Amino acid sequence: MKQDLVSIVTPVYRAQDYIKETLDSVLAQDYESWEHILVVDGNDDPTIAPIREYMEAHPQANIRLIIQETN
């Protein structure tokens, strides 16, 4: 039986100290049909780098990064 897709949306702002713990928690779930969408508020947020590193280290994970441009 096919599982329904579950979308996990995480708003992110200067969360570089906690983001890897968040990503590890999502990746450890038993449910297999998920996507994790991280929305970063600002293109200069230091959280972007660890998210990109995590995405490169876990290419099998369905993680998307959305960076909202600041004015």
Image (tube, grey):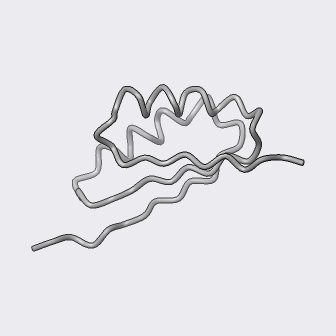
Q: Is residue 12 left or right of residue 5?
A: right
Q: Residue furthest right?
A: 71
Q: Is residue 29 left or right of residue 15?
A: left
Question: In the image, residue 23 lies at what x, y percent?
Answer: 44, 40
Q: How many marks?
A: 0
Q: Nearer the viewer, residue 24 or 61?
A: 61
Q: Residue at x 54, y 36 (%)?
A: 19
Q: Residue at x 33, y 59 (%)?
A: 34
Question: In the image, residue 68 lies at what x, y percent?
Answer: 72, 50
Question: In the image, residue 30 lies at what x, y percent?
Answer: 22, 53
Q: Residue at x 59, y 26 (%)?
A: 49
Q: Residue furthest left?
A: 1
- Relative to 66, residue 34 above or below: below
- Relative to 33, residue 39 above or below: above
Q: Nearer the viewer, residue 35 or 11?
A: 35
Question: In the image, residue 9 lies at what x, y percent?
Answer: 53, 59
Q: Is residue 69 left or right of residue 5?
A: right
Quarter of the figure with residue 48: top right
- Relative to 53, residue 33 above or below: below
Quarter of the figure with residue 1: bottom left
